[in-house]
Image (cartoon, coloured by chain):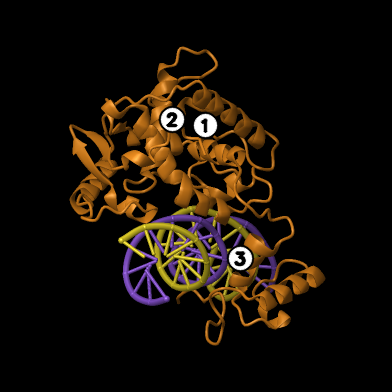
Chain colours: A orange, B purple, C yellow
Amino acid sequence: MGRAPCCEKVGLKRGRWTAEEDRILTQYIEEHGEGSWRSLPKNAGLLRCGKSCRLRWINYLRSDVKRGNITPQEEEIIVKLHAVLGNRWSVIAAHLPGRTDNEIKNYWNSHLRRKIYCFLKSLNDSSFPPTIDIAAINASISKRRAPTRSNTAPKKLELGNTKEVIMLQQTIQKNNNNANDEAFDSKPGSECLGLEAYCEYNDEELGAYEWLDDEIMKLSYMFESGMLVNYGDNNINDEEVKKSVSYWNTTATTPPSSSSSSVYDWHHHHHMHLTGGSVHQWDLCEQDQIPSTLWGR
DNA sequence: AAAGCCCACAACCGCCTATAG
DNA sequence: CCTATAGGCGGTTGTGGGCTT
């Protein structure tokens, strides 16, 4: 027996919400509170899926949702948290009051991803593309535990997925490993980023945020001290990773002929090469789009 | 002025876990 | 313990407005 749909789709409205629908939903939740999303549309008189109502409320209508542009400070926090947490948008959002996971995810996909990639490229063009130590990263990630729900646990990285994050993590790891600074607990090949494994705490414990704050401080130090240099000498041992590399190498190595620079096309412009057990990442980044600094606006 | 393109972001989708019955 | 359902998450798509040609 297949999974039951969240609601009857027949006859339901889709697409953008109207002001009237927003008003009805807001009024209903103000009167009855959040929850019972499945029955809410019917009770409120909305021709919408319960999930759609929930999303609309959480991402847009809630009074504590902060509107307006992401500030440079918020952007910096997003980048640093993402380097630690990966695509765990809800956890990242929890550290940015008034911002939703959807908003941060969109901002990352449309603004930051390319920005960071260009930044890394501009740091050390001669050694570009950098080598990616996926095995070490995955070994590290597998040791971490999600703060709350198991389905938010860090997923194993896959080639072709958030590669720029891998680059960032690897770069930081390499620098951390090479950093002659006692403030960092350097554990080459085992603890990605040189950051402490997320295995001692959960969200119910105060320690979770202490851990995160500590990691943010470390990352902040690394960013600010300019410890971002590319290296490349890692081998891949994991067979699964090799298979992924092979798959990616044979199916995604042909860049499009167009010279589009959109974020969407950015994905398609990437291809990976497996050379001597190392994975290299290639990309193009128009000269005039490389920012002088990552944070410059 | 109009057609086509690009981009940001709102919304949807599928999958997962938690939990109630 | 098992099953159905609700809630939540990340990935992806669609749309509308602005920009370019």
Q: What is the C-alpha distance between the residues marked 3 and 1?
A: 32 Å
- The earlier-in-sequence mark between 2 and 1 is 2
Q: Position of residue A173 (x, y in %)?
A: 42, 27
Amino acid tagged 3 = Leu
Seen at 51% across and 54% down, the residue is A106
Mark toward the viewer: 2 or 3: 3
CA gap, disc 2 and disc 1: 9 Å
Query: For residue A258, which quarter of the picture?
Result: bottom left
* Chain letter for the residue marked with disc 3 in the picture: A
Q: Is the same chain shared between marks 3 and 1?
A: yes
- Pick whichever of labels 2 and 3 is earlier in the sequence: 3
> In front here: A33 or A237?
A33
* Residue A223 pos. (x, y %): 50, 27
**Considering depth in this image, is A130 or A88 the residue closer to the camera?**
A130
Q: Residues within 10 Å of mark 1 (few under 14, many from 20)?
A: some
Crowdedness near tag 3: few (<14), some (14–19) or many (≥20) residues, C-alpha within 10 Å: few
Q: Is residue A126 above or below residue A270?
A: above
Residue at numbered disc 3? A55
In the picture, the disc for residue A197 is 1
Would you name the residue on which mark 2 appears?
A192
Could you tell me the amino acid type at mark 1? Ala
